[in-house]
Each structure stands twice: as structure tokens, then as C-alpha cells.
């Protein structure tokens, strides 16, 4: 009986997280490049980071010119563009590395179960 109860609880939590993502609420973790957590901790949203937004715009401009992800990554690394640097409360630092080819969420479209959702309420850079 305890295993069944634990499975039901886990399923409810997954459903709640999925529903929050569908509403465009940020669920925590490291925010994507170009965004920071909302300054009000009670608001589960993202706000645009102006400095990082320049990097994101530069990456999209490079893609507009080069039309090839590998060429964009090489040129971005030549320009010294780096991934988001994040400091955790524990003091551990992550990121600030040369850019690698990955899925982008900086376009304002996040994916949920591999289905892009442009209607999410995340401000566009």
C-alpha cells in the first residue's frame, strides 16, 4: 500500500510541475542564458538580463548571417562569447564556458515533452 501511495504522490507532483510549465512559470534551477530569476522570490518567473541578452542577440545575428550552427559556435568562441555563469548558494560556480551546440531556450520557446510552446509567458530577448 505504501508503494502505491508513493507512486500516486509522485504522479501528482509531476502533473503539478507540468501544469506550472504550461502556464509559463519558471520551476527553478539554472535560468537560461539571457534570463535571471525574478527579483521577488514569490514570483516564479524570469526577467531579461540585459548583459546576457546582448550575447543571445549576437548568437542569433551570427546564425542569421552564417546559417550553420557549427560555424556559429566557432565564430561565437572566436568572439569570446560564453555560456551563462551561475553561482549557487553553496558557493559552487557553474558555466562561463565556451558555447556548445545545444537546444536553445533563449528564443522564448521552451519545450515540454518535446512540444515547443511559444505561448509561454517568458519575455523575449
Image (tube, helix red, strand yellow):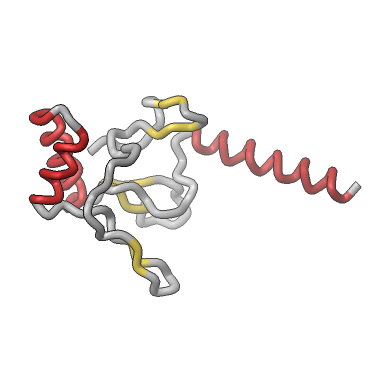
Residue in the picture at 15% in, 52% down: 81
> Which residue appears farthest toward the right when viewing the image?
1
Q: Where does residue 9 sit, x and y in percent of width and height? A: 75, 45
- Tell me residue 71's x, y (percent): 14, 37
Which residue is painted at 25% across and 60% down in the image? Answer: 96
Furthest-bottom residue in this view: 91
Q: Is residue 14 left or right of residue 67?
A: right
Residue 58 pos. (x, y %): 12, 41
Q: Nearer the viewer, residue 23 or 100?
A: 100
Total labels drawn: 0
Who is closer to the viewer here, 27 or 105?
A: 105
Observer-nearest of 11 and 64: 64
Q: Is residue 33 above or below residue 70?
A: below
| Image quarter of residue 63 | top left
Q: Which residue sits at x=20%, y=54%?
A: 82
Nearest to the observer: residue 60 or residue 36: 60
Please identify the quarter of the rendering in which residue 120 is found: top left
Image location (x, y in percent) of residue 119:
39, 25
Q: Is residue 99 left or right of residue 2?
A: left
Residue 83, compared with residue 66, is above or below; it is below
The quadrant the C terminus occupies is: top left
Q: Residue at x 79, y 48 (%)?
A: 6
Amino acid at each position: 500500500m505504501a508503494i502505491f501511495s508513493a507512486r500516486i504522490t509522485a504522479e501528482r507532483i509531476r502533473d503539478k510541475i507540468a501544469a506550472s510549465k504550461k502556464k509559463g512559470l519558471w520551476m527553478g534551477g539554472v535560468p537560461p542564458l539571457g534570463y535571471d530569476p525574478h527579483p521577488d522570490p514569490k514570483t516564479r518567473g524570469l526577467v531579461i538580463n540585459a548583459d546576457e541578452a546582448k550575447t543571445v542577440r549576437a548568437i542569433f545575428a551570427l546564425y542569421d548571417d552564417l546559417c550553420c550552427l557549427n560555424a556559429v559556435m566557432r565564430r561565437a568562441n572566436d568572439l569570446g562569447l560564453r555560456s551563462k555563469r551561475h553561482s549557487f548558494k553553496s558557493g559552487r560556480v557553474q558555466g562561463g564556458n565556451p558555447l556548445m551546440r545545444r537546444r536553445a531556450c533563449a528564443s522564448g520557446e521552451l519545450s515540454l515533452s518535446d512540444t515547443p510552446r511559444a505561448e509561454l509567458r517568458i519575455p523575449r530577448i
